[in-house]
């Protein structure tokens, strides 16, 4: 991988990680359209450490409160009813599905799941699901001619059941094109949570999964020697810087705006890929040589 490739891929990772458009799909598509080798699952996982570092810094106060309350609840029974302590447990519970499936489906994630036809399909299907979820949220928030606005749930209402459903939604993002934030935010909206609550828990829930995945890939890459470390570290730094700016923008955007622009973008991109593959202009296995 060249330094120029790492710069572009780092920018793509930072720009798309927190938006509901799938960063893994965009990394793969960028390489395919540019005629580069597939950066591979290892590159994706390692550069995600950069974007998750941005999450750690942006939500540092929330994270510090949750960790502090969770540890105190281990020895103080009175703390176990504290919302922050419960959030610690809910993040752990919500991380179980992706942890189990990430290990058991590792070969598929790095192989068959990277077929561009699968990526295109998941872009479209998850785009439609996000659109439906967004419309339901908008209907509750604004009401209508014959119905009053309905109050949506906040993170104070998060239960073990809902946390586990969030986790299952996050696990779907193991398939390129689904989008971690897109799946979890859609799940949250369909369960009746506000846009801000769904996005905030989505970002917090991603921290253990992404850091664990990155550490796992770091170990394999160190032993296998199949990663270009200089460009990969450079891309990770770029992803961190861009990712932080995107989080700040996105958290403000969702308080007043709809997710529909992302829905239209996902569907149009998915259709474009299908058309290009069908015409033979793009191979469904383009850029897979680096794996």
Image (cartoon, rainbow, N blue to C red):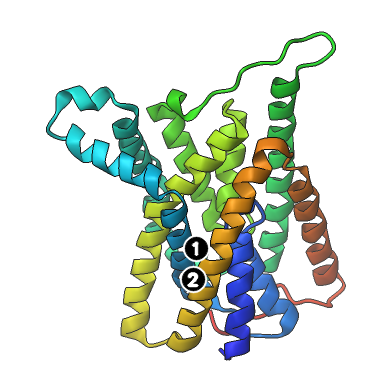
Left or right of residue 43: residue 225: left
Residue at mark 2: 47
Q: Residues within 10 Å of mark 2 (few under 14, many from 20)?
A: many
Q: Nearer the viewer, residue 107 or 260?
A: 260
In this view, 265 is above or below 110? above
- Per the image, label 1 sits on a secondary structure element best described as helix
- Decide if residue 167 is in sight here: yes
Q: Nearer the viewer, residue 203 or 128?
A: 203
Q: Position of residue 257 (x, y in %)?
A: 73, 39
Q: Residue at x 41, y 55 (%)?
A: 56
Q: Residue at x 36, y 74 (%)?
A: 218
Q: Residue at x 64, y 58 (%)?
A: 177
Q: Nearer the viewer, residue 139 or 271?
A: 139
Quarter where residue 268 is shown: bottom right
Residue at mark 1: 51
Please tell me the numbered disc located at residue 19: none
Find out whether the residues at labels 1 and 2 contact each other: C-beta distance under 8 Å.
yes
Question: How far, Cα to Cα, is label 1 from label 2?
Answer: 7 Å
In this view, 109 is above or below 89? below
Q: Position of residue 101 (x, y in %)?
A: 42, 53
Quarter where residue 103 is shown: bottom left
């Amino acid at each position: 991988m060249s330094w120029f490739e790492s710069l572009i891929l780092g920018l793509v990772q930072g720009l798309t990680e927190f938006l509901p458009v799938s960063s893994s799909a965009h990394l793969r598509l960028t390489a395919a359209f540019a005629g580069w080798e597939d950066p591979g699952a290892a590159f994706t996982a390692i550069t995600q450490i950069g974007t998750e570092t941005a999450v750690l810094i942006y939500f540092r106060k929330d994270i510090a409160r949750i960790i502090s309350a969770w540890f105190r609840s281990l020895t103080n029974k009175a703390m176990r009813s504290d919302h922050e302590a419960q959030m610690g447990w809910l993040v752990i519970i919500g991380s179980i599905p992706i942890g189990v499936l990430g290990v058991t489906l590792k070969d598929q994630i790095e192989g068959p799941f990277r077929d561009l036809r699968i990526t295109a399909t998941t872009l479209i299907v998850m785009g439609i699901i996000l659109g439906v979820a967004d419309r339901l949220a908008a209907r509750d928030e604004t009401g209508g001619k014959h119905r009053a606005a309905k109050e949506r749930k906040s993170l104070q209402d998060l239960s073990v059941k809902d946390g586990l459903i969030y986790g299952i939604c996050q696990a779907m993002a193991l398939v390129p094109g689904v989008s971690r934030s897109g799946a979890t935010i859609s799940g949250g909206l369909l369960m009746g949570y506000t846009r801000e609550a769904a996005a905030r828990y989505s970002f917090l829930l991603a921290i253990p999964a992404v850091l664990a995945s990155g550490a796992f890939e770091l170990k394999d890459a160190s032993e296998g020697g199949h990663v270009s470390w200089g460009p990969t570290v450079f891309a990770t730094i770029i992803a961190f810087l861009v990712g932080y700016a995107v989080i700040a923008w996105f958290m403000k955007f969702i308080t007043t705006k709809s997710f529909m622009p992302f829905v239209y973008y996902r569907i149009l991109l998915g259709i474009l890929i299908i058309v290009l593959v069908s015409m033979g202009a793009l191979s469904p296995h383009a850029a897979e040589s680096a794996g």
